[in-house]
Image (cartoon, helix red, strand yellow):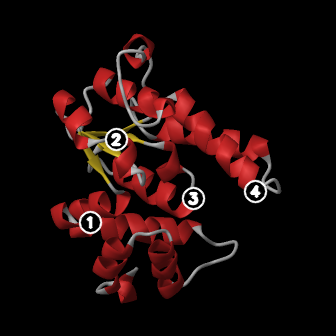
């Protein structure tokens, strides 16, 4: 099996929302790119979600984390701790994400918080910072069929409750992903 060489760190804020998390991971499983994250990133999105949604069972979220790690080959980054103190970012709490990206030789960090990773800092490490909408749109440009197939798989799993094609696309737009939603709208009938 040939593994994609383009490697990204998924920041906690892109793993927070189930629809975006599902699409990113489905594409990684489909070998469009290699997805990486750390246990620290994992804990961050789980804590944030539990804070915002105390009605969600923490055990179910932790089980989701296990499934994520089991599904995505070689996803977990460790051994990056010694790099953290040498990095300067606007929010020192984001240094672990950049450190993990450097250590794992990632091509990009996928995050909603572009300003937290200034290009003049991350460019030194030959890493780009991409908004998830831009990243997903790039993936769509690379392989429309793979992205459409990923969305079809996701929608087939959404049976309780089921979700219409239009509602799925509306959710993508609502998550700040208008480019990928617009690209997929052309194929709405087959999603």
Q: 71 and 23: which one is in front?
A: 23
Question: Which mark, by number, is residue 18?
Answer: 3
- In space, the residues marked 1 and 2 are separated at their CA atoms by 21 Å
Are circles 2 and 3 on residues that touch, CB within 8 Å?
A: no
Question: Which mark, by number, is residue 53?
Answer: 4
Q: Is residue 29 visible?
A: no
For image coordinates 75% across by 56% down, the residue present is: 53
The answer to which of marks 1 and 2 sits earlier in the sequence is: 2
For image coordinates 45% across by 79% down, the residue present is: 169
Residue located beneath label 1 in the image: 137
Residue 97 position within the rendered picture, expressed as x and y whole percent measured from the top left:
42, 32
Q: Quadrant of residue 140?
A: bottom left
Residue located beneath label 2 in the image: 117
Asked whether, in this view, residue 8 is left or right of residue 12, the answer is left
The answer to which of marks 4 and 2 sits earlier in the sequence is: 4
Which of the two discs, 4 and 1, sits closer to the camera?
Answer: 4
- Above/below status of 62 relative to 57: above
Q: Secondary structure at mark 2?
A: loop
- Above/below status of 114 relative to 34: below
Are circles 1 and 3 on residues that touch, CB within 8 Å?
A: no
Give the number of callouts: 4
Asked whether, in this view, residue 188 is left or right of residue 138, the answer is right
Residue 31 position within the rendered picture, expressed as x and y whole percent measured from the top left:
29, 47
Residue 45 position within the rendered picture, expressed as x and y whole percent measured from the top left:
59, 44
Q: Secondary structure at mark 4?
A: loop
In the orientation shown, which residue stands out farthest toward the top?
82
Which of the two discs, 2 and 3, sits closer to the camera?
Answer: 2
- Mark 1 Cα-neighbour bin, 10 Å: few <14, some 14–19, many ≥20: many
The answer to which of marks 4 and 1 sits earlier in the sequence is: 4
């Amino acid at each position: 099996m040939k593994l994609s060489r383009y490697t990204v760190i998924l920041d906690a804020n892109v793993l927070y929302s189930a629809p975006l998390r599902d699409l990113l991971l489905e594409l990684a499983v489909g070998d469009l790119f290699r997805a990486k994250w750390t246990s620290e990133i994992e804990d961050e999105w789980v804590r944030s979600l539990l804070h915002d949604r105390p009605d969600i069972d923490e055990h179910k979220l932790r089980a989701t984390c296990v499934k994520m790690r089991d599904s995505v080959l070689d996803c977990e980054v460790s051994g990056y701790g010694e790099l953290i103190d040498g990095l300067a970012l606007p929010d020192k709490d984001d240094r672990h994400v950049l450190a993990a990206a450097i250590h794992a030789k990632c091509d990009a960090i996928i995050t909603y918080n572009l300003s937290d990773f200034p290009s003049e800092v991350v460019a030194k490490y030959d890493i780009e910072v991409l908004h998830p909408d831009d990243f997903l749109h790039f993936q769509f440009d690379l392989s429309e069929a793979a992205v459409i197939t990923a969305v079809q798989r996701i929608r087939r799993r959404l049976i309780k409750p089921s979700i219409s094609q239009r509602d799925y696309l509306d959710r993508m737009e609502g998550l700040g992903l208008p480019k990928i939603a617009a690209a997929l709208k052309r194929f709405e009938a087959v999603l």
